[in-house]
Structure formats: structure tokens, C-alpha cells
Image (spheres, rainbow, N blue to C red):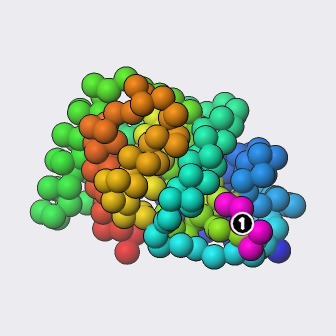
Amino acid sequence: YILRIFKFNKSVNISREFEYKVQKKAFLKKISSKVYYFDKKEGFLISSYIKGIHKNSLRKKDIKQLAKVLKKIHTLKIKSKKYNFYNDLKYYTKKLKDNKNIRYLKKLKKELKKISLYKKQFALCHHDLNTKNIIFTNNHKIKVIDWEYAGVNDIYFDLATICVEFNLSKQKEQFLLEKYFKLGSLINKNKLKSYKKLYILLCSLWFSYNI
């Protein structure tokens, strides 16, 4: 078993109760661990332990498998507000006043304007698909953990996260998009590029504030 004890988190986009609900649904899709107990008042969650490894790089067969898992995440049905990146912008603008982060915030604002021009493809997203939250199990499955940032957003955010976190080459990025979308007409490389920039900027601001 895994016991997660939640510390007070000031993030604008975390709801532990929602995390619990999403993980239960993800377990039913066989893409996450089983939740045995959640205590909102005391702030802890008990779930099953998953045996497996984390990977820092992906082979094509891993990408193909991960694309299927992403599709399952994006078909989870649960009511949620749409993720609003302008909340992050406002929050970090109040908290981070040094020159380096002011530059990041200006870039973030610029990228958000670009992203607003693209047609949206909303679905439930994980929002934190870093290498430590993806487990390749001993029986050759992929399980996703830590659903604390889950919420409705454009699916390209999760796709961009995978590309950045696993440092995918252009060829592997294309392979991921092809396996995810099936139809080439749905692929938008410029949109992916913008979401990659957005993800990198948000990570930079998060680390500046939390570390």
C-alpha cells in the first residue's frame, strides 16, 4: 500500500477531493492504482502499491502504449471547471517579483495569447505527466499516479508535457501525435510547440515559487 499525506498546498489548481474522484475513475479504466481510503478532514489517501519502473526516455513501443493511456485519460467523464492558466499568471505575478521571473511572466502572457487563437480540444487532463508520475509495470502495463492537478483542459497540454518530460525528438513527437490522433488532419505541430513553451514556463515559475 501507499499512504499519501497531504500537506497544505497553496496552489490555485489543487482539490484533493477531486483528485480522489478522478483516481477512482482512472482505476476503473485500468490506468491507475486502486484507492482504498480517502480522509478529506485528516488529509490522507491510501492506495495500492504499483511495482514497476520510471523511464527517462521512450522507445517507439513505449510511445505507442502511452498514446493509448493518454486517450483513456482524455475519455474520463467527470464534471470539472476548465483549467484557467490566467489564474496561474495572476498568482505568480503577485508572488514573484524578481527580474528573471518577471521575464518568464511576460513570456507566459505572450504564449497564452497565441494559444487562445487555436481551436480547443477539451477533455479531462492529468496536467502533471512528468517521468515520476508514469510507471511502467512489471507486467508491461502503464499506470499513472498523482492526479492532484487533474482538470479539464486542451489535450495538447498533456501531449506537450510528454514531449518535454521525455525529451522526445521531432521524429518521436510526430510518432506520438500519429498514434494519438490516427487522422493526420487533426495534428497541429504549431499548437504543440506553443503548449510545450507554456509547460516549460509554468514549470520554471512553479520551481521558482516552491523551491
**Residue found at x 32% / y 26%:** 118
**Residue found at x 46% / y 70%:** 57
**What is the number of callouts on the image?**
1
Q: Is residue 141 magenta?
A: yes
Q: Secondary structure at mark 1?
A: loop
For the residue marked with disc 1, what is the amino acid?
His
> Dot 1: few (<14), some (14–19), or many (≥20) neighbours within 10 Å?
few
Task: Indicate the position of residue 183 as horizontal and vertical percent values.
Answer: 48, 29
**Residue at label 1?**
140
In the rendered image, the quadrant that contains the N terminus is: bottom right
Camera-side residue of 10 and 69: 69
Q: Is residue 40 magenta?
A: no
Q: 135 above or below 118?
A: below
Camera-side residue of 118 and 57: 57
Q: Which residues are magenta?
A: 138-142
Relative to 190, is 144 on the left or the right?
Answer: right
Task: Indicate the position of residue 108 as horizontal and vertical percent values.
Answer: 24, 46
**Residue found at x 81% / y 46%:** 28
Camera-side residue of 55 and 146: 55
Relative to 119, is 64 on the left or the right?
Answer: right
Camera-side residue of 85 and 71: 71
Is residue 37 visible from the viewing direction of this image?
yes
Is residue 87 visible from the viewing direction of this image?
no
Snapshot quadrant of residue 125:
top right
